[in-house]
DNA sequence: TGATCATATATTTTCGAAAATCACAAGGGG
DNA sequence: CCCCTTGTGATTTTCGAAAATATATGATCA
């Protein structure tokens, strides 16, 4: 088990089919902004870029289409999905619905292992921030992995495959917007404290308070990226 | 514009790429039960069946994977997703969350055109039932199209692309279970009356009543297909 | 000039066959 | 007798080139 090369997500290494690898690589480059919103995804270019044939590439792209990162038009190829306030609003709306329900179920059903998972994820996030000082910005991919893991840990006990999948997909979709807001961000200690606070309320099974906090947390990205009007 | 051949969904006719066509055809055959839950989707078989090459077929299958109708395992091909009480429970849970929120937004934002759309869809469904007597069973594909159109019309005004897409996908996923319950179904007049009742409450913008009715409506499939325990 | 159409070029999409991988059966050793 | 290895056939996956389609270029005509 060797470390993956720079910039290549480890998931790509373990992909046991080129189509999967293609999907992972393209997704990664879209999320990190190397492939900008609206960019044409020419098959020839991509094939050279990743050294993967046209067939598996196109298959990988097809998968990403249904995940909302790519749009594909009939005989006119694929493009990276555009970003817009409208879209972030939609993502946030959907996330709120999904996560509030998942949280409700998790609080109702969660067992000791669930609680332990939350604390573990929180701890890892905290350690990372301590170690990397204030450069912890979410732009750093491995920090974001921990951040996602934390939010996922809050919901795992919900017992719904679909809610969890939706959460994961929507989290990724929001990443492109979150990247923008990483600059100009408060300090690490505050960031961790906010998450710990949320975790505490959840572990205390205070449903209403937890939901309110989570909702506000989700809205914060929207508020930050498009400060104009952030209603509903 | 000629009528599509028997058993071939019209969407397939207008598909301007073989991959799309493949996705539509396979989806259709899965939903109608011609491809049973758990069935192996061998590329060679499918290629013969639909007279489509391996490349576009596989691309079509890849799309359906992210839509929950197919599962694909690394070097081991694709299978039709299994059905289970567990799964129907999950679908229903997700549908409830999505539709209640979409309904809330639609009632808040709906304009005259939205109201008109609901009445139009209801009318078409009613006419169909009048014309076809009690053989209207949802098993009939074109009736189900009208049924889906009605439920979609209730939500269109919600203004969220993602909520509408999720609704559509989940409706389709539930179709495989609904087919089972079509036998042993009350008479058509009652069916239409129930839907008219729901529409009335929605047009009157009675949020709470509407949501309660819609929730019960969604739960009915679960109750019918797996009568055992239908809790939560 | 501006618009329309034909031609050429670039891209996407699809095919048919090769390569890689898996599943199963037969044989050999403990 | 069971377990592990090895070989064979079937299946998935991928490649490289051909076909189909879109896009750009430039010429012709009003």
Image: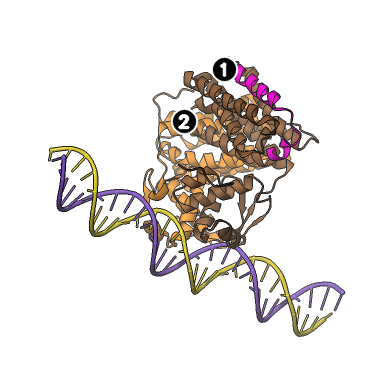
Chain colours: A brown, B orange, C purple, D yellow
**Subunit ID for the residue under disc 1:** A
- Where is mark 1, residue-wise? A203
Instruction: Tell me: residue A19, above or below residue D28.
Output: above
Residue B113 in view (yes/no): no
Callout 2–callout 1 Cβ contact below 8 Å: no
Location of residue B182 in the rendering, given as x and y in whole percent from the top left corner: 43, 38
For this view, does B228 lie left or right of residue A24? left
Residue B2 in view (yes/no): yes
Crowding at dot 2, Cα within 10 Å, few <14 / some 14-19 / many 20+, comes out as many
Q: Of helix, strand and loop, which one carries label 2?
A: helix
Mark 2 and mark 1: span between their CA atoms?
Answer: 26 Å
Crowding at dot 1, Cα within 10 Å, few <14 / some 14-19 / many 20+, comes out as some
> Which-is-in-front pick, marks 2 and 1?
1
Q: Do labels 2 and 1 share a chain?
A: no
Quadrant in the rendering for residue C7 = bottom right
**Subunit ID for the residue under disc 2:** B
Location of residue A204 in the rendering, given as x and y in whole percent from the top left corner: 58, 14
For this view, does B44 lie left or right of residue A36? left
Is residue A33 one of those drawn in magenta?
no
The stretch in magenta equals A178-204
- Where is mark 2, residue-wise? B89
Q: Residue at x 62, y 61 (%)?
A: A76
Magenta-colored segment: predominant secondary structure: helix
């Amino acid at each position: 088990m060797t470390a993956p090369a720079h910039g290549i997500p480890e998931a790509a290494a373990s992909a046991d089919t080129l189509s999967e690898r293609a999907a992972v690589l393209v997704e990664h480059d879209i999320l990190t902004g190397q492939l900008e919103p609206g960019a044409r995804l020419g098959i020839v270019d991509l094939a050279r870029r990743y050294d993967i044939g046209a067939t598996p590439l196109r298959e990988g792209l097809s998968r990403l289409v249904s995940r909302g990162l790519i749009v594909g038009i009939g005989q006119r190829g694929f493009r990276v999905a555009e970003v817009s306030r409208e879209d972030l609003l939609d993502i946030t709306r959907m996330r709120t619905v999904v996560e509030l329900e998942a949280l409700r179920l998790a609080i109702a059903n969660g067992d000791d292992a669930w609680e332990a998972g939350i604390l573990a994820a929180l701890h890892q996030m905290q350690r990372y921030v301590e170690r990397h000082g204030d450069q912890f910005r979410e732009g750093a991919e491995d920090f974001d992995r921990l951040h996602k893991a934390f939010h996922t840990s809050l919901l795992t006990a919900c017992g719904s495959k679909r809610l969890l999948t939706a959460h994961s997909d929507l989290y990724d979709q929001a990443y492109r917007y979150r990247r923008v807001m990483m600059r100009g961000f408060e300090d690490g200690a505050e960031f961790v404290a906010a998450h710990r606070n949320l975790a505490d309320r959840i572990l205390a099974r205070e449903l209403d308070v937890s939901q309110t906090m989570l909702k506000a947390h989700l809205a914060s990205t929207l508020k930050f990226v498009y400060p104009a009007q952030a209603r509903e």
